[in-house]
Amino acid sequence: MTQDGLDEAFHSADPDVRRRAVQGMSLRPRGTPLKRIVDALSDSDWRVRREAISLAAQSAERDALIDSLLARLVETDNIGLRNAAVEVLGMVAQGKAHKFANALAGAGGGAQKFVVEAMGKTRDPGMIDHLEPLVRGPDGNVAAAAVESLVCIGGGRAEGLLKERLSTPHLFLRISILEGLTRLGTRLTWSELGPAVEDAIVRRISAELLGRTGEPEALEFLLDLATDPSPQTSSAALRAIAVLASETQGDRDELIDRLSASNDSFRHALHEALLHGDTPTRQGAAYLAVLCRDPSSLEAVLQAVADDVVSPETIAALRTSGSALIEPLLMQRGSEPRVWAIALELAAELSYRHLDEVPAAIRDRIRSLIERDLTDAADAVRAAAAESLLWWGDPRDCRALVECLSSPSHQVRAAATSALEGLAKRVPDDVEEALGEADLDGPGGADIAQVLSRLNSAGAEELLKRGLHSGDPRTRRAAVQALAIANASDIAQLIGYAVADEDIDVQIAAVRTLGQMSTGEADGPLGTALDSPFAPTRAEAALALGRREANGAIPRIRALLEDTEPVVVSAALDALAWLGDSEVAKAVERALSHADDEIFQAGLRAARTLPVHDAERLVSRGLTHSAWNVRMLAIKLLLDLDTERTRLVLRRALTDETDSMVRHAIESGLRLGA
Amino acid sequence: MTLLHDAGPSLSLREFRLIRDFINQFCGIYFADDSAYVVERRLRERLRELGVEGFAEYYRYLQYHPKAERELEAAAEVLTTNETYFFREAYQLRAFTDEILPAVRARSLARGSKRLDVWSAGCSSGEEVFTIAMLVDASGLFDGWDVRIFGNDISRRVLSKARGATYGPASFRAMIPEYAKYFIDTEEGRQVHPRIRAMCHFGHLNLMNQRRAAIVGRVDVTFCRNVLIYFDDASRRKVLETIYQRLNRGGYLLLGHSESLLRSTTAFEITQLTTDIVYRRPIPFTDMPPRPI
């Protein structure tokens, strides 16, 4: 659109035309006069104002824009403009605290709070000096706005100011502070928080902070809140109790006893939350129900496990519940299949772990339930029964488990495989006999191969060799891997054939397996694999030859540095570095100017093998890479080099690093080094 | 590997972020760092299936393997929750029946068309698609019209369930009794009536793939409820752009009750209905009927 067209569109009666005009101006923001930006920010349609906010953020006349918006903020009654101005100021006014201070001085109480709101949106710690007197000031509305702004800015100083004002007698302000500290993730001690939450109204919004204290004194208040008629308050309290329970250190048993002795209304709230809460609430409630050993909630807990909403801590707590849980678990037979599957498996595990405490009748019952459920209609139940045989299995079960290996459900096959692997250690002959009739061409061919690899017998080896001819590539791949695990003799040539398999995954498995063999016979097929039409196979072959220290392959691997596929180039570079190729430094220089992250990373790894002085210089280049994972690798390698220069470089990198995980890697690495 | 027992390789934070970002680029779904354990648990199933030993190798598979795209789909499938049910968020469906459908009908008739197109973007196992079809049928407004309701999802598994159109009790938790006539009891569950199924079509479509989304054609109403909550901001914007392109002018967009476009796009206008607020692709002033003098 031409400039004239834009001007006309800007004054159109159709808000969508105005919106697009402002959007068009964003393409050349430097040419848009300030007045037009402010007019657009005052538009009656929110969509035009939103586009104007993006336009304003790009304005070249930053100081004039800030002055103009601060003036409007104080004067205008146009709510749309005021909100837009607050948002724009938040985006452009960092480092301009003095302008806000002047605006505050000239504004009345009503307008001051808008200026304060904009100060917070800048997230500029420089604003805190001007916010501090306002938090202590007499105007409650302004003080609450200042609290909100301190929360937006965050950081230790803002948090300190908020904590200091917790003792304010003004309830409204205290609520604002507590909500702010909740959002900041602040951890208050019981002695800091307790006096501030004596009032019941204040307590209702403080559940999260109470939980975070990790001190059992907070429990009474939380138990009270958990039975609040409002589902929001009750849910927040339950989540907080779960946090409290997992973070309490010394008095944990006492806390659990107190929870276990809690009244019916608490248990009812817990049950309701487990059934109808959102995911975090169900997660917290499940943890508490397990800690309380509440049998009435068991089915709901198991349902939460089936729905994949419980934390690993809850699963761990269930598994360490003790033998008292076994009978309630067995009573779940008849529940929804997934619930029963979990109950059966857990009962089987607990009864095995507490064998001495479990009456023989219960043990027999579990055993017969497992046998029966191995043929249940539901996959989850069959898988649970098969998995239970990891503990309870004996030679009688081998045949049934092998039948499970032909199930179309990978869940059932995986469980049966794991049980058979367990049995292979105890009764290998029975497992081998049962597998003799197994169908390597069926859906479970790969699983059968995995079990066979554990048997370490000539018969198993023969069966595995048969697997190499299976029509299913997954079985051929598994047979190749299994032959290596079984440490079968004289198989290099057979696996060498698999390098020419038509399936890429079989090729890769063969190359890897050959790479691990000590025989020189492996080198021939690996050399062939360097010419595979599949890039991942070429890459794996280069790596395998590098690991085997096959120096004779250096010229051919060097040629792969010209490959069009990054995965091949990076593998070739790794291999040449391992082989100590004399020309690797040259390849490193090229890799470190390459746009592809993987090649760059291979360059860093290869640089690490060069003489220390070169390694320090070259690896340091990774610290300024735009990808966080490349920087992480550079940090790891520099920490590994651990010289005075690398420590200095890392300390400097810390100043510019914005990614929290990368910063943490540098900080913890330097601390450990020190 | 069962619902309870879950052993296998562990996922380091570094591997989690690499895989998470890769999957995000592919289909827009985003996982915060505190979801790492869920991702670890669900992807282990994929590692086992592929015979891959650890997550670093799995990441390389996703990057370089010739079957990587298929695997990305499989990963997205195990990582997404597909729970839905008939007549979800009834107040919104009331707005659809009472206000949106009559408006769409009037607008189509004014264009001389007797066709209704609705898109359920991210339809999961199909309950929403069939709910829409039942509502359209029950309204009586479109008898004799060409009604096409299209649902898409990235998961082939849920699409297969949708095509089967047979559902268990969990899908009926918010069922409205007067619509029971649209189901036939079978041994496997309650099956949607063939007349309703005939209006409904399903397709495998990644919402991030704008080019392929053209198969949806132009629609009068798009339902995209509780889908964008799993996306990051950039992906959300991209999907909304696609939805905008697929909507006829004046076409409606219905989001989940906790979702808003305020931070994502200005392309849609807000329309206040009696029982709900919905979004709409604006109608240019030039297309509007002249105001009465």
Image: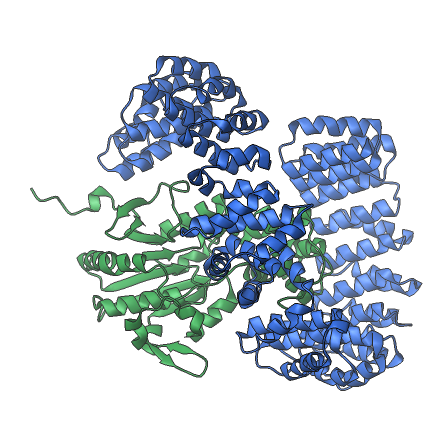
Q: Is residue A603 above or below residue B77?
A: above
Residue B292 percent across, percent down from the top left: 9, 44
Inspect this view and state whether residue A73 appears.
no
Inspect this view and state whether residue A240 appears.
yes
What residue is drawn where x is 19% and y is 60%?
A: B109
What residue is drawn where x is 67% and y is 49%?
A: B15
Residue B274 percent across, percent down from the top left: 23, 52
As drawn, is A48 to the left or to the right of A366? Answer: left
Q: Residue furthest left?
A: B293
Q: Colour of chain A?
A: blue
Q: Is residue A662 above or below residue A457?
A: above
Q: Which chain's colour is green?
A: B
Residue A481 percent across, percent down from the top left: 79, 68
As drawn, is B161 to the left or to the right of A392? Answer: left
Q: Is residue B287 above or below residue B10?
A: above
Closest to the observer, A336 or B18: A336
Q: Which quadrant would the C terminus of chain A be assigned to in this image? A: top right
Residue A322 percent across, percent down from the top left: 69, 65
What residue is drawn where x is 65% and y is 51%?
A: A254
Q: Which quadrant would the N terminus of chain A be assigned to in this image? A: top left
As drawn, is B208 to the left or to the right of A286? Answer: left
